Image: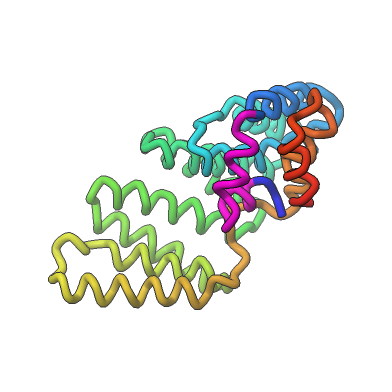
Amino acid sequence: MSLGEKAGGESGAEAIACLTPEAANIEVAILRRLDESAAETAIRAALGFGEFARFAGLGITTALERAANAAQTQGAIDLTAWCFYRLGDIALRRSDDDTARTHYEAARPLYQRVGDLLGEANCIRGLGDIALRRSDDDTARTHFDAALAIYERIPEPYSIGWAHRRRADCGGRRAPPARRCREGSMAKHRARRSHGGVNRGVPRGVTPSAMLFANRIAPPLSRHTIAYAHASF
């Protein structure tokens, strides 16, 4: 399980508490390796670290931004797309909608070039989240419908459930209370039933986790952090 998955999972609070004090060390280690021959490994570590930073609310993006540049230099389209997408997620979490949109729109055509339907759909869903936050329900519904259509093509059950939930939120402010409650409950039920899906917003191959990677190349980390890293492998 990657660092990002741990931070966003059931034991996320404990993971975040253990790793947050070491965040600066981890980022420095990743930045150091991005300038070396093992750049691809560092890019994948930056992706895992970016997901941790998103869940922890740290807003740390330097490593991801550098990783995106390194991926572009290498011609690694898929990794470049994942870096932009992750940067979009972090910006969305911080309510920086314009930056989030820029990154999602940069990532989407790259996912299309490599035929990554899941990544493309996630970007569209992110654009829908931005529109929904701005109360542009029609645009949000259009994006969620487009994302849902792709999720159903894959198929990706977990994301299908969440797309239905997002759609139920569109226009919810104008819908009668009873209908709002019914649609929201049905969408949540779909999401719960399909929780066994694979979409956690983490690219395939992001291993070892950023924590394990950092333990190998950074100065010695705290005893608790190292214990957690070994437990997550």
Where residue 146 sits in the image (x, y, percent)? 42, 63
**Which picture quadrant has residue 162?**
bottom left
Relative to 231, is 66 above or below?
above
| Residue 45: quarter of image | top right
> Depth check: 150 or 61 in front?
61
Instruction: Check residue 188 for magenta coloring.
Output: no
The picture places residue 65, in percent across and down from the top left corner, at: 60, 28
Q: Residue at x 77, y 43 (%)?
A: 227
Q: Is residue 60 left or right of residue 79?
A: left
In this rendered view, identify the residue nearer to me: 232 or 72.
232
What is the number of callouts on the image? 0
| Among the 4 quarters of the image, the one containing residue 15 | top right
- Residue at (22% x, 70% y) in the render: 180
Is any part of residue 112 visible from this angle? no
Q: Chief secondary structure of the magenta span?
A: helix
Q: Is residue 201 left or right of residue 92?
A: right
- Locate residue 143, reporting x and y percent: 38, 58
Instruction: Compare residues 82 and 72 and report the one nearer the observer.
Output: 82
Is 19 in the magenta?
yes
Q: Is residue 213 above or below residue 139?
A: above
Q: Which residues are magenta?
A: 4-21
**Residue shown at 74%/30% (left/top)?**
222
At 41% from the left edge and 36% from the top edge, which residue is drawn?
A: 94
| Above or below: residue 53 compared with residue 13 | above
Question: Does 20 sit above or below residue 51?
Answer: above
